[in-house]
Image: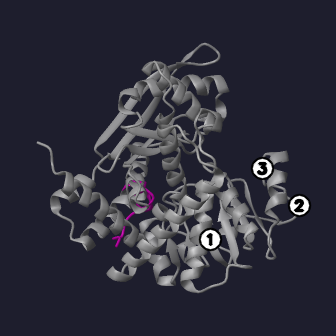
């Protein structure tokens, strides 16, 4: 699927997305015109805006919002704050959102946003002013029927509350459905915070069932212990899975008989880190990821499994809780090793599915209890897993290409039915 390329090209998220898209589109015999339409974002917004910092000086920030496709509904996708945000990254994430929404068959297109900044070095007041100014710069392009942002890396419920309030002030009315991932008391949904982790758990369950393997005592290693990783770990441990390793940015933990996730969460709450947890062996994060396990869950950032380490990955199942954790070149290596991969656009789609539920509830002004959210979420995810497996078996392709083929087919069919406006 991938020719010989440099590491820089390999880890470029837009190049990785393009490689998967083109391979899947070729398998589908996609119409050349639709190929052109779906291979590029429909809109890319770049804004440069000033913010007054706490010490009085003015800082200029750069922000992005990319809308890949709105054929099936409003754009949907998170906003991330990080010093290394790039337009190529945001492009790739927007396109992945298009495919992710289509895989789970919810009526959204794909979008993504980001601001180049280092939130760790900014005060709460600076973050609020930056968020509100960024929102005002892109305000004509977002809205409940246009593009609905959500939290992502280094953004959270508070960020969404600021965006919702800023948008509402401009609209002169409260518009809760402009964003998802909000606090409960201003239109958030029960079950939203742990939805991505719950989706990862469902994918682990479905993978083991498909491969006819037991879940009780199944060994799991997670890379990343943020919202997705910690919720995945907690939910899996509660179901009888054995979490034997956690790989974090500041070091890893390993215990062959299983880590007590409840106690680890308490330790992190007290200390702000998992580093130094006394009930597991401290280990380099790379070594934890390469330890033998039944399920490996990368649940943090892109490009953690590349041509540089894929041959050392020792897992039967890979469930991608993060976006783009595996490069296209690494895919080929894992396939040769017989690893069963649940790709990101399926594995971490619990978050966007719950976001869809939040958007629906906001728009009708009636909110479901948590049991209803969980029931509907798990039903959609189980059905989507079966759809991808069916495509994989029918077209004799791996799960990732099957997921792309399913998604592309759904989006392309919608465009054909709508026709091309001229």
The magenta region covers 1-14
Q: Residue 273 carries which label?
A: 3
Cα distance between the residues tagged 3 and 1: 21 Å
Tell me where residue 119 appears, x and y as whole percent. 61, 34
**Residue 41 image position (x, y, % from top left):** 30, 47
- Please check the rendered image and state whether residue 3 is part of the magenta-colored stretch, yes or no: yes
Name the residue nearer the viewer: 29 or 12.
29
Residue under numbered circle 1 = 296
- Secondary structure beneath dot 1 equals strand
Which residue appears at 57% of the width and 28% of the height?
Answer: 162
What mark, if any, has residue 278 been given in the picture?
Answer: 2
Q: In which quarter of the image is residue 35?
A: bottom left
Dot 1 or dot 2: first in sequence order is 2
Instruction: Determine the CA span between mark 1 and mark 2.
Output: 23 Å
- On screen, residue 188 versus residue 107, left or right, reads right
Q: Which of marks 3 and 2 is nearer the N terminus?
A: 3
Q: Which colour scheme is used?
A: one colour
Residue contact between numbered discs 1 and 2, judged by CB atoms under 8 Å: no
In what element is the residue under mark 3?
Answer: loop
């Amino acid at each position: 699927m991938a020719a010989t390329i440099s590491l820089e090209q390999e880890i470029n998220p837009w190049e990785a997305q393009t490689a998967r898209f083109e391979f899947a589109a070729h398998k589908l015999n996609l119409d050349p015109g639709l190929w052109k339409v779906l291979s590029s974002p429909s809109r890319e917004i770049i804004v440069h805006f000033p913010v007054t910092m706490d010490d009085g000086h003015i800082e200029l920030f750069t922000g992005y919002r990319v809308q890949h496709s709105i054929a099936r509904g409003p754009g949907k996708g998170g906003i991330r704050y990080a010093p290394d945000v790039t337009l190529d990254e945001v492009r790739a994430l927007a396109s992945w959102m298009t495919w992710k929404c289509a895989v789970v068959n919810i009526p959204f297109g794909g979008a993504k946003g980001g601001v180049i900044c280092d939130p760790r070095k900014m005060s709460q007041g600076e973050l609020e002013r930056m968020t509100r100014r960024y929102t005002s710069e892109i305000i004509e392009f977002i809205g409940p029927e246009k593009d609905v942002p959500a939290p992502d890396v280094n953004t959270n419920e508070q960020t969404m509350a600021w965006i919702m309030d800023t948008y509402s002030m401009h609209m002169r009315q409260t518009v809760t459905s402009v964003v998802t991932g909000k606090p409960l008391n201003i239109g958030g949904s029960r079950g939203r915070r742990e939805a991505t982790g719950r989706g990862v758990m469902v994918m682990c369950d479905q993978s083991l069932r498909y491969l006819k393997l037991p879940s009780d005592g199944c060994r799991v290693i997670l890379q990343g212990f943020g919202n997705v990783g910690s919720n995945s770990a907690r939910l899996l441990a509660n179901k009888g899975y054995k979490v034997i390793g956690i790989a974090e940015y500041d070091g890893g933990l390993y215990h062959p008989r299983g880590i007590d996730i409840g106690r680890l969460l308490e330790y992190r709450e007290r200390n702000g880190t998992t580093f130094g947890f006394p009930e597991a062996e401290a280990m380099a994060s790379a070594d934890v990821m390469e330890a033998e396990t039944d399920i490996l869950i990368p649940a943090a950032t892109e490009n953690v499994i590349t041509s540089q380490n894929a041959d050392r990955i020792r897992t039967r199942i890979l469930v991608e809780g993060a976006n783009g954790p595996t490069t296209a070149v690494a895919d080929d290596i894992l396939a040769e090793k017989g690893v069963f991969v649940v790709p990101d656009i399926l594995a971490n789609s619990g978050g966007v599915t719950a976001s869809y539920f939040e958007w629906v509830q906001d728009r009708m002004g009636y909110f479901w209890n948590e049991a209803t959210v969980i029931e509907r979420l798990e039903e959609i995810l189980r059905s989507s897993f079966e759809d991808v497996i069916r495509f994989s078996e029918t077209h004799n392709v791996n799960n990732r290409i099957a997921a792309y083929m399913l998604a592309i087919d759904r989006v392309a069919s919608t465009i054909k039915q709508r026709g091309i406006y001229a």
